[in-house]
Image: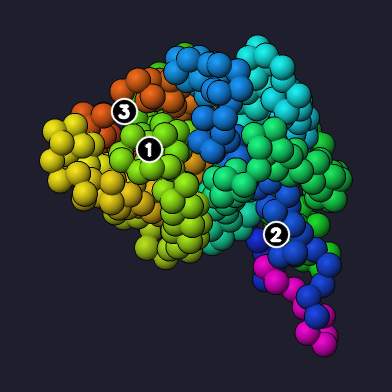
Amino acid sequence: MRKEQRDETSDCSRVTEPLIEKDDIGRITEGSTFISLLSTGVAVLGSFQIGLCIGYTSPTQLRIVDEFDLSLSEFSLFGSFLTIGAMIGAITCFGRKGAMGFSSIICLLGWFAICFSQSSIWLHLGRLFNGFGMGVFSYVVPVFIAEISSANLRGTFTTINEVMLCIGKASIYIIGLFVTWRELTILGIIPCLILLFGLFFIPDSPRWLAKVGNIDMCAASLQRLRGKNADISDELVEIQEYIQTINTLPRAGFMDLFQKQYSRTLLIGVGLMLLQQFGGVNGISFYASETFVSAGFSSGSLGMIALGVIQVPFTIIGSLLMDKTGRRSLLMISALGSCLGTFLTGLSFFFTGQSIFLDWAPMLALVGIVVYIGSFAVGMGGIPWVIMSEIFSINIKGIGGSMVTLSSWGASWIVTFSFNFLMDWSTFFIFSAVSAIGILFIFKMVPETKGRTLEEIQIELNS
């Protein structure tokens, strides 16, 4: 019974030798941590790409609207096409390295379509392509990293993808203030090319290679990741046992997700994503500039610079704390801060609408959004994706991960399409209420996964 509940990534998360190997004079030998870090670094370029795609509409909104004479609804459609593409990408994930390479090519096509577009049709098509690639990246990157990382570093390594996502958003917010919207697409093209080049120098996931029956390549990949002098025999045996377990299980279908034994797992995965998105993050991120203008600023530049600066350090803090304080506590603190931040922002919009405290309203909006983004970055931004990669059992991990990712981008589409039309105090108060509900949900439903093997997590969830 214990073997049957082993998760898809658990066996590849254990090392039998020290993670950092040194020779007789103290030099780090080939492989080991370096290859794991290199592999993670290449993979998270996909996360950087997600940040660029999400943030692109904010500094470019007014210029694209003017050049193509778009209405508010037409630009909202352009912005939300990203999430439509992401929903398609979320249900078409395949492989690990192959998926990342294919997604990079699709994103390249999307950026070129936007860069050279002469009509709104090409804008929408480019945005759709970017969304497709983003949807695949959002699932495959955290899973790939979880499959190549050791158990004690899995949380930190996996949340590097959220750090890179935030760096992507920060980069496009700030650089977008100084270049044209067409020139800004170059910032999206460069990481796609680097990722494609980098894939030639990293091993594929040992777990994935074993899953498709290539044990020899699995062993070679594992040896590179653990170091050329590491003894991988025990870990390789565990992987082979895992494959035998998979072969004894029936092939999971979509309806299997709704069986009683998986109900809590599905509820946790989907619930965290819905709380993440309905808390307003992508509405605020997609249209940050317009949000600050609506709050009373003469332009959105100051607010966008503030968002760009604040996200990265808070995300790094969250990733460092995750394997120390735990996922669950960080999620609750993050949801509490998000609740406060959106409440303050809603209060600012309320004051503006009632024509009271007009001198204070813009600064209150800035403080509220900065508090929200900082709090979100600490936990709610990255931890749900880490938990998603940890909680599903081996036989439903693929379909479960796709379902969770699909629900995330589906909720994001609702928020991003409607946000421009509903940008008033009540909307931010709704975001605040969602975050408050999130605190209760996390307290009652989400298990602590810090420092636990994926097998142990499965035993708790299915007991």
Is disc 2 placed on a helix, strand or loop?
Answer: helix
463 and 214: which is toward the camera: 214
Q: Quadrant of residue 98?
A: top right
Q: How far apart in space, not on screen, are marks 3 and 1 (Cα)? A: 11 Å
Q: How far apart in space, not on screen, are marks 2 and 1 (Cα)? A: 41 Å
Say if 262 sits above or below 299 in the image. above
- Callout 1: 10 Å neighbours few (<14), some, many (20+)? some
- How far across and down, in percent of the image, does residue 459 sit? 41, 43
Q: Kindly identify which residue carries mark 3.
A: 423
Q: What's the coloring here?
A: rainbow
Q: Residue at x 78, y 84 (%)?
A: 26
What residue type is disc 3 on? Met
Q: Kindly identify which residue carries mark 2.
A: 37
Lateral position of residue 89 relative to residue 375, left or right? right
Query: In this orientation, does residue 148 appear?
Result: yes
What residue type is disc 2 on? Leu
Whichever of labels 2 and 1 marks the residue nearer the N terminus, that label is 2
18 and 384: which is toward the camera: 384
* Residue range (magenta): 19-26
Q: Residue at x 65, y 47 (%)?
A: 44
